Image (cartoon, rainbow, N blue to C red):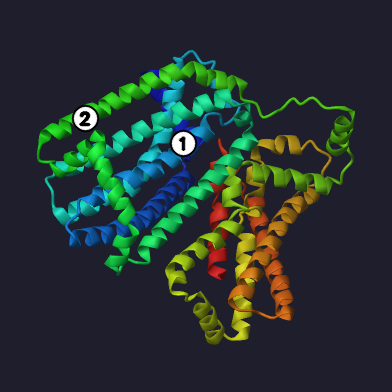
């Protein structure tokens, strides 16, 4: 058991990379404490924001359901839709973290039970799954509890239900992902996994955004909500009649005053934990085989023409600046954390805002009216300024330059041995940011033409000014990461998400916007 606890602590420190209270000399570090406090505050803020959004949705649904006497149906909605989101995130996280780096191969050689390795990893990854369940399911349970004032065991039963759902979903996710990785060679290519995971996450995010906006846009019109949810209501009522576990969970909440349901839920949670441990122990030999066979390299048989082309492309002489630029592009697009929080922001942010706008006013055909109102209210100068600032924001919000050296922390020792001057190295980093700054400016141009219908001469002015402003922001970000790089991290999340330079730059860019 001590080995399992040690593995859980190790995986927790590796995956989440929280700053330690003490430095290398054993002294308490005030800087680390402030960083940890900032991370906790940011996490609470994000959870509070999403929790408030979930609260609004469930509160609106409850009022509509209560008006027709089916308020209990909100518990089914919370359970079904919450489980759906947890399944999506749980499968993606398990699939992407079966093999993270070469450390996994060394971990498999430790003198511990093979089942402990997978159990420890699953226990750590179940934390964000439980938090998601708390937001998507727990919010609905709390809304129902506030309005109905049930017996106090209702909240205890709800907590055990959240734990049970999380445990079973995590176990199911690994039960699917590990055999899939073992059977399909294509899934053992990390680039393929990153692409698939990125697409899955994007589809899930956009679906969640569209679903929430569809409900929030009709919160004041109960008849529209009932029409929107009529199909789901009928399907859920059929599930209640045909699925005994769902009926048991619902009764444990509605009849919470009966302690027998609490006792049964405790037994189910204990049984779920034991079942998960047994399942992970059975999967551990297959897990170790996946770890040992997981390779980022492919051996491919080539003919003479293919070999000549490969050698010409891979070993041909290139400009050092171009080589460094291509290396930066490949490394940025390889990690999903870098890609989704970096270059993809240029596409993701307008798409999310577009979905919100469509479901807010699209049904009333008011998009053109908003465009006309914006042109009438804002002067041409204001329209140009807004377009320029938007382009600069999209072009510099990618966090490419403000995390440039931090992302190279593991390779700086090798890079320092290359015959490359610091000026050339930093120039390639800046050029990388400028390229996406240009892309962000072009996206802003398209939005400006659609909303403001600006003329062609002004298009060139907006493009040039937004590129210049984004270059200045990228240059400032590169300077910050040069003088204060984040060089100590165990996984890419820490280099990107826990980098104070990225926080400073995004706040500055939001201030400008």
Residue sitting at 31 percent across and 22 percent down?
274
Residue 110 visible in image: yes
Residue 331 lies in quadrant: top right
**Quadrant position of the N terminus in the picture:** top left
Spot occupied by residue 181 in the image (x, y as percentages of width and height): 55, 27
Nearest the eye: 474 or 196: 196
In this rendering, is residue 112 above or below 448? above
The residue wearing badge 2 is: 266
Residue 10 visible in image: no
In this rendering, is residue 423 above or below 512? above
Q: Is residue 344 left or right of residue 46?
A: right
Spot occupied by residue 437 in the image (x, y as percentages of width and height): 68, 61
Residue 464 lies in quadrant: bottom right
The residue wearing badge 1 is: 91
Residue sitting at 44 percent across and 26 percent down?
175
Residue occupying the far top of the picture: 111
Nearest the eye: 36 or 237: 237
Spot occupied by residue 129 in the image (x, y as percentages of width and height): 39, 40
Residue sitting at 27 percent across and 51 percent down?
140
Residue sitting at 39 percent across and 29 percent down?
171
Q: Is residue 422 left or right of residue 388?
A: right
Q: For numbered disc 1, what is the local secondary structure? A: helix
Spot occupied by residue 149 in the image (x, y as percentages of width and height): 13, 52
Marks 2 and 1: CB-CB under 8 Å? no
Q: For numbered disc 2, what is the local secondary structure? A: helix
Q: Which mark is residue 327?
A: none
Ranked by sequence position, the earlier of labels 2 and 1 is: 1
Nearest the eye: 409 or 30: 409
């Amino acid at each position: 058991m001590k080995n399992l606890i040690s593995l859980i602590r190790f995986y927790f420190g590796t995956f989440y990379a929280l700053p330690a209270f003490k430095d290398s000399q054993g002294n308490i570090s005030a800087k680390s404490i402030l960083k940890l406090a900032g991370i906790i505050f940011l996490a609470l803020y994000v959870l509070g924001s999403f929790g408030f959004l979930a609260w609004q949705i469930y509160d609106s649904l409850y009022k509509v359901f209560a008006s027709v006497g089916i308020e209990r149906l909100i518990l089914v909605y919370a359970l079904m839709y919450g489980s759906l989101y947890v399944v999506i995130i749980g499968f993606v996280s398990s699939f992407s973290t079966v093999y993270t780096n070469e450390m996994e191969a060394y971990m498999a050689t430790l003198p511990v039970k093979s089942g402990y390795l997978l159990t420890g990893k699953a226990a750590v990854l179940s934390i964000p799954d439980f938090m998601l369940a708390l937001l998507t399911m727990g919010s609905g349970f709390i809304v129902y509890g506030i309005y109905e004032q049930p017996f106090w065991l209702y909240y205890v039963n709800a907590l055990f239900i959240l734990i049970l759902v999380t445990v079973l979903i995590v176990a199911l996710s690994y039960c699917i992902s590990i055999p899939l990785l073992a059977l399909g060679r294509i899934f053992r290519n990390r680039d393929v996994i990153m692409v698939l995971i990125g697409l899955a996450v994007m589809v899930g995010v956009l679906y969640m955004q569209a679903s929430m906006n569809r409900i929030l846009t009709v919160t004041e019109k109960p008849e529209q909500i009932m029409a929107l949810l009529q199909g789901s209501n009928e399907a859920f009522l059929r599930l209640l009649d045909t699925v005994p576990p769902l009926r048991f969970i619902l009764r444990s909440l509605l009849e919470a005053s009966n302690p027998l349901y609490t006792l049964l839920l405790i037994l189910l949670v204990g049984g779920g934990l034991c079942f998960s441990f047994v399942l992970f122990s059975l999967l551990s030999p297959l897990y170790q085989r996946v770890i040992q066979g997981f390779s980022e390299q492919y051996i491919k048989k080539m003919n003479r023409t293919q070999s000549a082309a490969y050698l010409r492309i891979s070993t041909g002489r290139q400009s050092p600046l171009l080589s460094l630029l291509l290396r930066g592009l490949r490394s940025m697009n390889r990690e999903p954390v870098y890609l989704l929080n970096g270059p993809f922001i240029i596409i993701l942010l307008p798409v999310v805002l577009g979905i919100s706008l469509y479901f807010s006013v699209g049904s009333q055909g008011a998009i053109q009216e908003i465009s006309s109102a914006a042109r009438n209210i804002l002067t041409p100068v204001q329209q140009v300024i807004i377009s320029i600032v938007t382009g600069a924001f999209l072009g510099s919000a990618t966090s490419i330059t403000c995390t440039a050296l931090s992302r190279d922390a593991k390779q700086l020792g090798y890079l320092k041995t290359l015959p490359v001057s610091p000026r050339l190295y930093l120039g390639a980093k800046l050029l990388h940011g400028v390229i996406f700054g240009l892309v962000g400016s072009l996206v802003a141009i398209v939005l400006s033409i659609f909303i403001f219908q600006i003329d062609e001469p002004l298009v060139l002015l907006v493009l040039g000014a937004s590129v210049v402003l984004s270059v200045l922001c990228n240059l400032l970000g590169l300077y910050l990461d040069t003088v204060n790089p984040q060089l100590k991290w165990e996984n890419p999340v820490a280099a990107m998400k826990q980098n104070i330079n990225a926080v400073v730059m995004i706040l500055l860019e939001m201030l400008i916007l």
